[in-house]
Amino acid sequence: MVQPNDQDVTQLLQKWSKGDESALEELAPIVHSELHRIARRYMARERGGHTLQTTALVNEAFVRLIDWKNAKWNSRAHFFGVAAGMMRRILVDFARKRPKKDGTALLRVSIDKAERAGVGSDPEILALDDALRSLGEFDTRKARIVELRFFGGLTVDETAEVLSVAPITVMREWKKAKAWLYLELNRED
């Protein structure tokens, strides 16, 4: 099977958003495959024995994306950036609803440690989510870059395309965001 290029996917997304249901039929296996890649990345960061499985995460994200059929998708990267954000919210919602057995507070975690080894527990993903929301309150672009790069696995070029900025801007903002998050996640209360 020949893999469609980014332009083919973008054209299918645009046809779908204009109401072409046959485009969704063509798009579904492509989207499903890519969502699985993103979900595996997310789930690799989760603790062992997580009760939310990769397929369930993909299915939930896909159902939510279907509701966005009237969205104006600019590109494949734009679509999968939105999908990555949805998966992040699904995992955070799942972590928030999960009862804490030991009553422990949120843990501090380094974003570099999380990026290398993966976020391993619900308290760590909640701490990272809280820090990312704090970052977003005063710098939405940096927060979005972290979401797209760290959670969505988008490349620098794909992130730049989604945000309509130069790749060098993404790299510069990514470094600043990681430094800010490191300080935020490791500060003493």
Image (cartoon, rainbow, N blue to C red):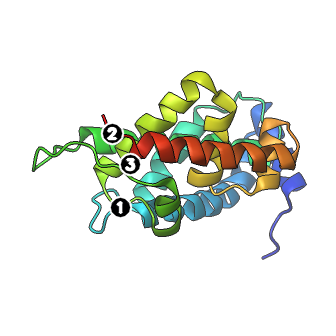
Q: Is residue 188 above or below residue 56?
A: above
Judging by the rendered image, the residue that carries numbered circle 1 is: 120
Disc 3 is placed on an element classified as helix
- The CA distance from mark 1 to mark 3 is 8 Å
**Mark 2: few, some, or many residues within 10 Å (few <14, many ≥20)?**
few
Residue displayed at 59% across by 64% down: 37
Q: Residues within 10 Å of mark 3 (few under 14, many from 20)?
A: many
Local packing at callout 1 (Cα closer than 10 Å; few below 14, some 14-19, many 20+) is some
Say what secondary structure mark 2 lies in: loop
Query: Are circles 1 and 2 on residues that touch, CB within 8 Å?
Result: no
Pinpoint residue 20: horizontal percent, then vertical percent: 78, 38
Q: Quarter of the image containing the N terminus?
A: bottom right
Residue at the spot 31% in from the left edge and 45% down from the top edge = 95
Mark 2 or mark 3: which comes first in sequence? 3
Instruction: Name, please, the residue furthest toward the top.
Output: 137
38 vs 46, nearest the viewer:
46
Q: Residue furthest bottom?
A: 1
Q: Earlier in the sequence, mark 1 or mark 2?
A: 1
- What residue is drawn where x is 60% and y is 23%? 138
User: Real-space Cα distance between discs 1 and 2?
Assistant: 21 Å
Mark closer to the chain start, 1 or 3 = 1
Q: Is residue 23 visible?
A: no
Residue on which the image places disc 2: 188
Q: CA distance from mark 2 to mark 3?
A: 18 Å
Report the number of numbered marks. 3
Q: Is residue 109 above or below residue 2?
A: above
Kind of residue sitting beneath label 2: Glu
- Between disc 2 and disc 3, the foreground one is 2
Residue at (37% x, 42% y) in the render? 127
Q: Nearer the viewer, mark 1 or mark 2?
A: 2
Residue type for callout 3: Ile
